[in-house]
Amino acid sequence: MPTKKNTLIIGDVIAIAILTVIGFATHGEVGISFLQRMGTTFFPLLLGWFICAPWFGLFNEQVTSNSKMLWRIFPAMLFTAPLAVILRAALLNSSGIPLFALILGTTGALGMLVWRGGYLVIAKKTGTLPG
């Protein structure tokens, strides 16, 4: 049986993958031919998230089991998105666009809020979290 932390990690990876696909879909760029380009957004965002999220306690059970702590997703993504844009620009040998960082951060935070909030609701209903 996976631990709560492993569940959060797997869920975060899936949430970032879904957000990446949705982002590309909004530009009409979904399909096998876009996988490489999706990877240049997905992997930097994933790396940025797993660098920044622990600093905000987003894998600490005392934080992740408290709905009042979901706000921590927003500042974590505030730091994650610019880092991801810089990493992406380095991968593509291009420049990072500040507006892209803003959009990526906003949509990323909202997407993670939906996932983490849903996790919290389900975990509390099934009794796998205290409270």
Image (cartoon, helix red, strand yellow):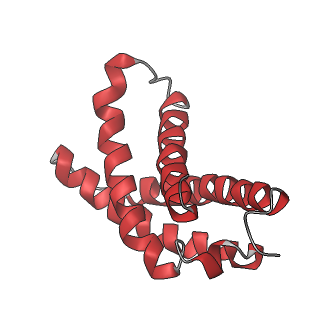
The residue lying toward the viewer, choosing from 5 and 39, is 5
Q: Position of residue 30 (x, y in %)?
A: 46, 22
- Which corner quadrant holds the C terminus? bottom right
Q: Quadrant of residue 3?
A: bottom right
Instruction: Identify the residue shown where x is 55% and y is 47%.
Output: 15
The residue lying toward the viewer, choosing from 85 and 53, is 53
Q: Position of residue 28 (x, y in %)?
A: 50, 23
Residue projecting furthest to the top? 32
Whether residue 70 sits left or right of residue 7 in the image: it is: right
Whether residue 46 sits left or right of residue 72 in the image: it is: left
Instruction: Identify the residue shown where x is 43% and y is 53%.
Output: 100
Q: Quadrant of residue 110?
A: bottom right
Q: Position of residue 113 (x, y in %)?
A: 66, 60
Instruction: Identify the residue shown where x is 39% and y is 64%.
Output: 50
The residue lying toward the viewer, choosing from 34 and 130, is 130
Residue projecting furthest to the left? 93
Whether residue 70 sits left or right of residue 81 in the image: it is: right
